[in-house]
Image (cartoon, helix red, strand yellow):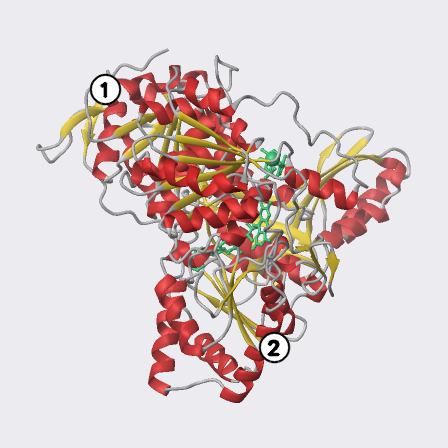
């Protein structure tokens, strides 16, 4: 049953009559959307027809819907704008779920438009029908099923608004095929504003709480700042840097927060948590006042909760009240946008011209320098094998840090986080919360599309890269000169490491036989491939690759198979119980 | 601790499953859940009875508030409130039991709403423990069917949950 009716033109005569498909496309233009990452299918054919023959919205045709979501996600992380995805019903929607969940866990603004079977057949197990709203409900910030074409524009506006404000996240808009029927045309005007009585994120921090936080900070003798992805999302790197310098306190970043404070600055102690530095974790353990900024006390960060910051009073700034005191009870909660709250804090500090106790701070820094002297990231530089850490160090040197670096998931991700110094936010792009292998390459495509003239690399492993390897074809189609840095240890290294430590070296299924020849594979897709087997060749290969400015280069580094990521805190242990290489330290 | 959380939410299809899904996904307890539209048909009022430590209840209310469809909520147990539940209970009523049941229903201020030669159906309203007490008071063997609505609640005095 197809509904065929024309709705009468209402009121303001200037309005054009558009079909649902055309409304969608026109809305995206009006919303300022640049790219749509997608893949066609039956339920979205009307929409694809409306996209045809226009070039304001650039549609990027991926090779798998998972990659569409990761590419939109990479685009969003690099630019701060909302990533947009368009997929068909059924398998199109289910393929997108991994990428939606990835964006959800890391609070990334994204709007995913899924086609749906026509309204009259919903619920009848129609061809390619799945309950997309039901399937995605637990991994979206919100989702909508559009039941009337007259609601389409407003629903889309709400979707973009919800996705990009407050704590950002993915929003799914499920559109039945008959809603985009070219025969049903209605007047369209772009809804410029949106009001939702049930959704009003708090931006401004409570002044009383802010004052309490400042008093607590000023009384600190061993202060510590722990900041996370919320600072990047809020665009508050500048404010965080100003506050940290002003206080003279040490600072650590979570995996998601890297770049929010300059990685090359001496007040920066490196990443904290399971694979964080000795100095960052020890400073967490010993501090007396902890300022947590846009971070969510994840279990990879806190370790054993009973031993988390045992001597500290904790201040927590977060836009999501549910993040506050979720796992760790805090003393001064501040609900609000990081940028706004930090600005308010800075103003008060300026006005009062207040400083921390200098003598105490000096003593604290002396202690920290002792921890730092442990050189916890040391590795064997004389090895005849290529060490993964060495490749990352060279990558940093060769690019002088001027790089957008995406990552897959595993040891290579941790080495990148530890050894690449990010001085700016939005440069380090990885899946932290869900830890999605396959994220790196499509995310790099999204970044490269956003910044065609910037250097973009993807650090990956031979297992991760194969999860979205088909995207080499997309990268060819759109001429994306990404540099793929494959740290090929012929193992699912991160899995192998846990099996070495906790399963008496029973390497169950962490070894992949029959790896492809990545050089030939890259060439088969029309790209450049290189295999690098000796440490002496690492730098040269990287230089050569980056000189090939308009080519994707797949650099297959054959690395030490047995290298492990250190330091390491076992799951469920405290910050002071780190393994530092094979030496023990507690 | 037992808490009664009262929620004002958009009367949208799917809103109920968002709440139910939240409880199951995060492993929270639901003792009962009732929902119906209010005088404003665009809004639904939901009452959830749940149990958990202070920390869990705090998370539950925060997570509920985070749902886009939730307009407002209060934890009724934080103040004085009234809770009511409706029960319909069908009982075998033959011989001397018939009088006994009728007397019990009167004591509990219940009403007999359906009668056959061998059964009584009693309607009873009150806080949950009153209904429990009635169930306990009748002879277990005579209960044929129990239907309860779950708890609805409202705050006493001026306190109210509205837009
Ligand atoms: C193999 C592997 C190993 C890992 N090891 C580590 C490790 O050693 N160390 C580590 O740190 N992580 C590690 N992670 C990542 C970890 O799983 C978490 O993803 C990460 O720690 C979470 O970072 P975050 O706390 O900054 O939170 P995010 O997920 O970035 O959350 C951001 C927080 O900021 C808030 N927020 C958002 N926007 C705003 C705003 N405008 N204003 C205020 N607040 C806002 C949000 O509400 C949220 O609470 C690892 C991941 C993998 C896959
Ligand atoms: C989709 C998915 N499946 C499984 C995992 C579990 N996992 C985490 S790391 C890892 C191994 C990654 O191997 P590789 O890409 O070679 O990286 P390495 O650790 O060797 O650097 C696996 C299987 C995951 N994170 N994601
Ligand atoms: Mg590997």
The numbered mark at residue A160 is none
- How crowded is the residue under tag 2: few (<14 C-alpha within 10 Å), some, or many (20+)? some
Residue at x-position 26% and y-position 34%: A28
Q: Would you place residue A564 above or below residue A263 in this image? A: above
Residue at x-position 68% and y-position 38%: A495
- Residue B75 appears at what percent x and percent y? 58, 60
**Quadrant of the rendering where the N terminus of chain A is positioned:** top left
**Mark 1, residue position:** A52
Quadrant containing ligand 2? top right
Q: CA distance from mark 2 to mark 1?
A: 64 Å
**Mark 2, residue position:** A367
Residue nearest the observer in this picture, A131 or A357: A357
Q: Does dot 2 land on a helix, a strand or a loop? A: helix
Residue at x-position 89% and y-position 42%: B139
**Quadrant of the rendering where the C terminus of chain A is positioned:** bottom right
Residue nearest the observer in this picture, A448 or A120: A448
Residue B148 left/right relative to A296 = right
Residue at x-position 40% and y-position 67%: A240
- Residue A578 appears at what percent x and percent y? 70, 60
């Amino acid at each position: 049953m197809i509904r065929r009716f024309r709705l009468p033109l209402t009121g303001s005569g200037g309005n054009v009559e558009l079909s649902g498909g055309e409304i969608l496309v026109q809305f995206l233009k009006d919303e300022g959307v640049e790219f749509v990452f997608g893949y066609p299918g039956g339920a979205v054919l009307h929409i694809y027809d409306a996209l045809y023959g226009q070039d304001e919205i650039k549609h990027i045709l991926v090779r798998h819907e998972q990659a569409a979501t990761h590419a939109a996600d990479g685009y969003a992380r690099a630019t701060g704008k909302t990533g947009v995805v368009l997929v068909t019903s059924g398998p199109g929607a289910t393929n997108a779920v991994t990428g939606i969940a990835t964006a959800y866990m890391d609070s990334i603004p994204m709007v995913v438009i899924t086609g749906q079977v026509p309204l009259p057949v919903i619920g009848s197990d129609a061809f390619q029908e799945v309950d997309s709203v039901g399937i995605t409900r637990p991994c979206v910030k919100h989702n909508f099923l559009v039941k009337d074409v007259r609601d389409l524009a407003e629903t889309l506006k709400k979707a973009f608004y919800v996705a990009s404000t407050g704590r950002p996240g993915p929003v799914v808009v499920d559109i039945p095929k008959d809603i985009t029927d070219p025969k049903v045309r209605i007047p369209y005007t772009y809804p410029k504003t949106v009001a939702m009585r049930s959704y009003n994120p708090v931006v401004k921090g409570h002044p009383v709480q802010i004052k309490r936080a400042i008093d607590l900070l000023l009384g600190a003798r061993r202060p510590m700042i722990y900041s996370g992805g919320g600072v990047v999302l809020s665009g508050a790197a500048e404010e965080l840097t100003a506050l940290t310098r002003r206080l003279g306190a040490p600072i650590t970043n979570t995996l998601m927060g890297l770049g929010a404070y300059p990685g090359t600055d001496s007040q920066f102690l490196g990443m904290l948590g399971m694979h964080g530095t000795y100095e960052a974790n020890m400073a967490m353990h010993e501090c007396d006042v902890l300022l947590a900024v846009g971070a969510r006390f994840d279990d990879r960060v806190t370790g054993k909760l009973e031993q988390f910051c045992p001597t500290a009073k904790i201040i927590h700034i977060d836009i999501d009240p549910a993040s506050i005191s979720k796992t760790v009870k805090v003393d001064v909660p501040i609900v609000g946008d990081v940028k706004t709250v930090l600005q308010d804090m800075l103003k008060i500090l300026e006005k009062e011209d207040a400083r921390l106790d200098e003598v105490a701070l000096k003593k604290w820094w002396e202690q920290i320098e002792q921890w730092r002297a442990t050189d916890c990231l040391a590795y064997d530089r004389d090895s005849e094998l290529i060490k993964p850490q060495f490749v990352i160090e060279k990558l940093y040197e060769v690019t002088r840090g001027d790089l957008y670096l995406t990552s897959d998931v595993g040891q290579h991700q941790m080495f990148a986080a530890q050894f690449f110094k990010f001085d700016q936010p939005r440069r380090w792009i990885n899946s932290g919360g869900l830890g999605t292998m396959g994220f790196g390459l499509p995310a790099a495509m999204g970044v490269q599309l956003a910044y065609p003239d910037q250097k973009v690399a993807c650090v990956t492993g031979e297992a991760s890269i194969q999860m979205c390897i088909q995207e080499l074809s997309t990268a060819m189609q759109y001429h994306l000169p990404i540099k793929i840095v494959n740290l090929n240890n012929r193992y699912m290294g991160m899995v192998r490491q846990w099996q070495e430590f906790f399963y008496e070296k029973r390497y169950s299924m962490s070894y992949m036989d029959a790896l492809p020849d990545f050089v030939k594979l890259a060439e088969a897709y029309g790209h450049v491939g290189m295999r690098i087997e000796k440490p002496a060749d690492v730098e040269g290969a990287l230089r050569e690759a980056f000189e090939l400015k308009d080519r994707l280069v797949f650099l297959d580094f054959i690395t030490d198979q047995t290298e492990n990521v250190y330091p390491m805190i076992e799951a469920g242990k405290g910050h002071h119980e780190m393994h530092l290489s094979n030496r023990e330290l507690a | 601790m037992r808490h009664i959380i009262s929620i004002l939410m958009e009367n949208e299809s799917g809103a109920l499953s968002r709440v139910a899904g939240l409880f199951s996904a995060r492993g929270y307890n639901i003792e009962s859940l009732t929902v119906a539209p209010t005088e404003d048909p665009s809004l639904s009022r939901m009452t959830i009875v749940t149990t958990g430590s202070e920390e869990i209840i705090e998370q539950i209310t925060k997570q509920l508030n985070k749902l886009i469809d939730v307009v407002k909520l209060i934890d009724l147990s934080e103040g004085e409130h009234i809770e009511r539940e409706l029960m319909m209970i069908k009982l075998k009523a033959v011989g001397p039991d018939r009088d006994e049941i009728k007397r019990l229903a009167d004591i509990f201020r219940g009403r007999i709403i359906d009668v056959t030669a061998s059964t009584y159906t009693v309607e009873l309203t009150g806080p949950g423990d009153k209904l429990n007490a009635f169930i306990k008071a009748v002879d277990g063997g005579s209960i044929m069917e129990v239907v309860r609505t779950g708890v609805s609640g409202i705050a006493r005095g001026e306190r109210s949950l509205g837009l």
